Amino acid sequence: MNNPVVTSVAASVSSAVQENGQTNQTISESDVVNQLEVLVTFDQRMDESSSSTPVVTFKESGSDITPADRGIAIDPVASGWVSATEYKAVYDLTDSNDDVNDLEVQISGARDFNGNAQATHSAVAVINIDTIQPPVTLTASTESTSGNAYSQADLRALLQLWC
């Protein structure tokens, strides 16, 4: 049998799913209460033992990154083989106040049922991270909705409510 190869890598957060060839999965400010799942599908039956667990590496502009720096932490209990051909890596997300586009996922280290090493696979531009909170801009009007002018005391009170 030939060395196993990865046939697809899909990243998902909540109910939104990204597959090869589709738009990147974006991790946003509201997603940090969820988990990121990376589902890896191989072309043949794999060795499902812990010694053949695929290594999932994240790359930014071709260089390895430390996932924790981007608010991504592996959940080893939830991660594992789903079937003889599918491995799911699950990550807890935290708000890293980060903005990263085109994060790549590299898969390596797995072996098939016969012990043949998997060819390293890089999925290009799978994930975007945008956990920077948008700025809030306040503008005050000197007139109320009824057209009457606000007093300076009214404007101070409004500003105290918003600041």
Image (tube, rainbow, N blue to C red):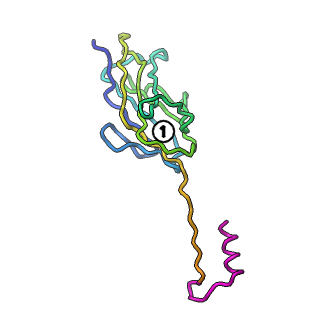
Q: Is residue 155 magenta?
A: yes
What amino acid is found at the position of numbered circle 1 in the picture? Leu
Q: Is residue 155 above or below residue 66?
A: below
> Quarter of the image containing the N terminus?
top left
- Closest to the observer, 46 or 72: 72
Residue 95: % across, % down: 57, 44
Residue drawn at point x = 47 percent, y = 28 percent: 64
Disc 1 target residue: 36
Q: Name the side, left or right, on which 67 lies relative to 116.
A: right
Residue 44 image-quadrant placement:
top left
Residue 159: % across, % down: 67, 71
Residue drawn at point x = 67 percent, y = 65 percent: 163
Residue 96 image-quadrant placement:
top right
Residue drawn at point x = 40 percent, y = 39 percent: 102
In terms of secondary structure, where does tag 1 sit?
A: strand
- Closest to the observer, 42 or 105: 105
